[in-house]
Image: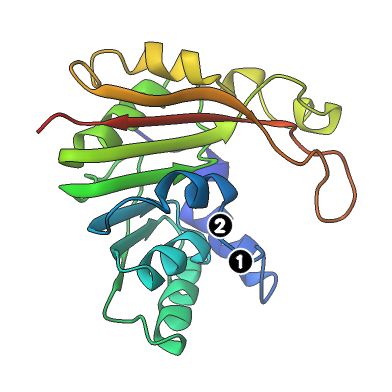
Amino acid sequence: MTAPEQFTAAFWDERYGSSEKIWSGEPNAVLVQEVADLAPGTALDVGSGEGGDAIWLAARGWTVTAIDVSRVGLERVAARAAAEGLGERVATALVDVFADPIPGPQDLVTAHFLQLPADVRPRILSALAGAVAPGGRLLLVGHDPEGMPEEFAGHHPPEMFATADQLVAELAEALDGWTIEVAERRARTGVQPDGRPGFPYDAVLRARRPL
């Protein structure tokens, strides 16, 4: 399946190429909340961007594969990992989740704000679940549609945003027999770094695959 324009390598290479740094470099808050107490193993960081999550995981003992559609982004992940002495713990792979196999099995598969079109979301997220090793975990975090700021409503189709309960329902077959450890709307700061209103809630789903 061909990815929409905003999910293509050309789109993200151009965006990353327009600035020396796009993201904060810090890990996503929910990753820290949900993973800090887990024993490290192998992890797959889906849509790794510039590597904030991958670097945080590697610094805590995880062996991480960072995947993204952007070669520019992955080069930044690799460069930062090398600079911080984590090169042996962080591998990068160019992966288009719309078309390519998902590398597995992994003890943790994590995807943050991979806001997908509703018609392909179950298929792609099910593929991520399929990459989880027995006993491993899937962590999905997205923007919950509750309280969506007007500026986002005008640029993204509403169906690209799902609640945690919607995700559980859409992944019912893929997660059959799994333990749903967390499925909730979680409050977050309502302000973006530049002071504009942000999404007030995250949709958080963490599930464990049976051994």
Q: Which residue is mark 1?
A: 16
Q: CA distance from mark 2 to mark 1?
A: 6 Å
Quarter placement of the C terminus: top left
Mark 1: few/some/many CA within 10 Å (<14, 14-19, 20+): some
Q: Which residue is mark 2?
A: 12
Q: Which SS class for mark 2? A: helix
In the rendered image, residue 204, in percent from the top left (x then y), is placed at 51, 30
For residue 155, above or below residue 78: above
Q: Nearer the viewer, residue 120 or 2?
A: 120
Question: Which residue is found at the position 29% from the left and 64% from the top?
Answer: 62
Q: Nearer the viewer, residue 137 or 132?
A: 137
In the rendered image, residue 115, in percent from the top left (x then y), is placed at 54, 34
Check the image and name the residue furthest to the right.
195
Marks counted in the figure total 2
For residue 123, above or below residue 39: above
Question: Which residue is found at the position 57% from the left and 54% from the top?
Answer: 11
For residue 53, above or below residue 84: above
Q: Left or right? Give the position of 190 relative to 178.
A: right
Asked if the residue under mark 1 is in contact with the one under mark 2, i.e. CB atoms within 8 Å, the reply is yes
Residue 92 marker? none
Q: Amino acid at mark 2?
A: Trp
In the rendered image, residue 4, in percent from the top left (x then y), is placed at 51, 36
Question: Which residue is found at the position 32% from the left and 37% from the top?
Answer: 138
Q: Amino acid at mark 1?
A: Tyr
Q: Left or right? Give the position of 88 relative to 27.
A: left
The quadrant holding residue 158 is top right
Q: Left or right? Give the position of 55 relative to 17.
A: left
For residue 209, above or below residue 194: above
Q: Nearer the viewer, residue 160 or 188?
A: 188
Q: Which SS class for mark 1? A: helix
Check the image and name the residue furthest to the left.
211
